[in-house]
Image: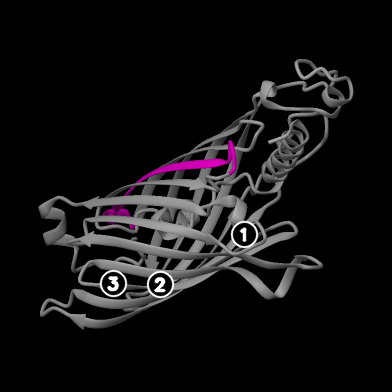
Amino acid sequence: MSSFAKTYCSMVLLLFGGLTASFGQDPQFSQFYAAPIYLNPAFTGNTTQVRAAAIYRKQWPRITKAFNSFGFFYDMNIQKIKSGIGFVVLTDKSGASALKFTNIGLSYAYKTGISRKVSISAGARASYTIRGINKSELRFYDQYVRDDPNSTIEDLPTNQITYFDLAAGMIVFSRSFWVGLSFDHLTQPYQSFIKIATVLPIKYSFHGGYKIPFEKTIKGDVTKSLTIAMNYKGQQDWDQLDLGLYLDYQGFLLGLWYRGIPVLKAYQAGYSNNDAIIFLVGYKLADYISIGYSFDLTISKLSMASGGSHEISLIYEWAQPKYKRDNMKKDFMMPCMKF
């Protein structure tokens, strides 16, 4: 590749990195229901008793220094007080500017019944975020004009910022359906590395789904089902829709999803809002362990250059025998997807 081409690519990557830092810094997961308390704090404690989950995403692997995200989630159900508690750890490294993001949060949810078959859960999450940037990886205009790639006259007052943030959400659910709404960045924290008053806009997410059982055991456990679900999210002028379904056939999972808003909205003239087709495969062992893999096939104009995205998730749920014997018949969990 010529020096001009390398320079051009570096500038393009920096531009994309900057836009991501400003408006899309939250890690995005295609398997969003494999990270339930990150999607909506009202999911906290929606488990038999204790749940631990991990998810990793490698986005656009063909682009040098692209995007890598990791999340770890832990929550538990406290049936005596109809509550759930949990914590979230997220890390993300993105763009040619080596932008790093680390978020640690605590979440709480309270659940109560609306009727014999329908319940409602409301939750909140408080978190602390550290954002850092490696200035040595940045390339500024003056470095090219002066033909001096080793120094710049541009001033970057700090290479690290921290802030406190809040999120809240609510979910209405039964054994077969759920619908929820969540809001992130309620404090709209200051998030700029330079002397510009830039706040992080509130992000909202509307999500729901319906589970259609095909076959049950004598005890009433579903062994074959089809789940249809969606997640619509937006932040300032940006929005996105994930819509799809997955089949659970005796523990084997197959899914197909679409991400984008092709007809109603375009990013700009000539650029339709088409992002990706997502393929999912997974296996669920006795409702305790779920492992899943997904691949995002990029269908936007970036498709040839990006290499798509890879994602893997693992969920482990467990409960003490006494808890299961005394409480499983008294309570029910949201039919949340587990890839």
**Is label 2 in a helix, a strand or a loop?**
strand
- Quick one: label 1, few (<14), some, or many (20+) residues within 10 Å? many
Labels 1 & 2 near each other (Cβ < 8 A): no
- Quick one: label 2, few (<14), some, or many (20+) residues within 10 Å? many
Out of 170 and 94, give the one closest to the viewer: 94
Is residue 257 rendered to the left or right of residue 251?
right
Magenta stretch holds residue 291: no
330 versus 145 height, above or below: below
- Quick one: label 3, few (<14), some, or many (20+) residues within 10 Å? many
Specify the farthest residue to the bottom: 214
Residues in magenta? 63-82
Res 173 label: 2
Residue at the disc numbered 3: 248
Specify the farthest residue to the front: 2
240 versus 161 height, above or below: below
56 versus 294 height, above or below: above
**Is label 1 in a helix, a strand or a loop?**
strand
Residue 134 visible within the image: yes
Q: Residue at x 83, y 34 (%)?
A: 196
Residue 26 location, x and y as percent?
58, 46
